[in-house]
């Protein structure tokens, strides 16, 4: 169990993890000695990458980065917070348009567990436009996503494209 004052949870689908996510993790590690990347299994979403693959790719993408732990979860974020021993949620804010939704989520989390706090971090300007949804769309139409995702993610997507083209 983590010290709740020193660990922060960065939740998301990370389907796939991209360089904006990695940037937020690096920024968070300047504030918190431990960041738990919590990969959400959301049955409502049709994932590009299966949960075990996402977890593996995140671990590979963050290999050698001290203070990072990767875990998967389903259900309520506050339940994951309690079980991990953390009470801080990290959320990335790309634009003002993200604020209303993220603020509402933070209020719900605090209502569900009064100890939950949310810290909003902004990515480096070069990553503000990145989103997993847009990366999935570019990739689905055959576009090059190599400059948007970590090398292990790009390798996996390339492998999948190669397998798919051999089946066709």
Image (cartoon, rainbow, N blue to C red):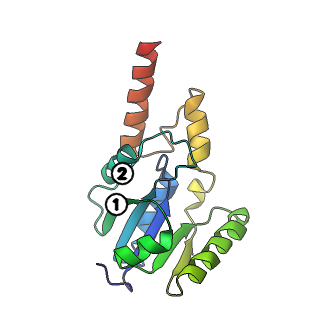
Quadrant of res 102: bottom right
What is the number of the mark on residue 70? 1
Q: Residues within 10 Å of mark 2 (few under 14, many from 20)?
A: many
Q: Quadrant of residue 160?
A: top left
Residue 29: x and y, percent? 39, 72
Residue 158 percent location from the top left of the image = 42, 29
**Residue 55: which disc?**
2
Q: Secondary structure at mark 2?
A: helix
Residue drawn where x is 52% and y is 56% of the image: 20
Q: Residue at x 54, y 77 (%)?
A: 119
Please say if the residues under marks 1 and 2 sit with CB atoms less than 8 Å apart: yes
SS of the residue under disc 1: strand
Nearest the viewer among 72 and 59 is: 72
- Real-space Cα separation, disc 1 to disc 2, in angstroms: 7 Å
Asked where in the image residue 82 lies, by quadrant, the reply is bottom left
Side of 128 relative to 35 (left or right): right
Task: Please provide percent x and percent y for residue 130.
Answer: 59, 50
Q: Is residue 13 above or below residue 33?
A: above
């Amino acid at each position: 169990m983590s010290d709740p004052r020193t660990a922060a949870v960065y939740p998301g689908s990370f389907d796939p993890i991209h360089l904006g996510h990695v940037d937020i993790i690096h920024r968070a590690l300047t504030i918190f000695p431990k960041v738990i990347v919590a990969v959400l299994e959301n049955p409502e979403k049709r994932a590009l990458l299966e949960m075990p693959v996402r977890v593996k790719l995140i671990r590979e993408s963050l290999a050698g980065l001290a203070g990072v732990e990767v875990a998967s979860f389903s259900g309520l974020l506050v339940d994951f917070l309690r079980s991990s021993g953390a009470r801080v949620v990290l959320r990335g804010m790309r634009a003002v348009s993200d604020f209303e939704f993220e603020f509402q989520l933070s209020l719900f989390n605090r209502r569900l567990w009064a100890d939950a706090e949310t810290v909003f971090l902004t990515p480096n300007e070069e990553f503000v436009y990145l989103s997993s949804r847009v990366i999935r769309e570019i990739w689905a139409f055959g576009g090059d996503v190599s400059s948007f995702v970590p090398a292990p993610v790009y390798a996996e997507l390339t492998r999948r494209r190669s397998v798919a083209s051999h089946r066709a």
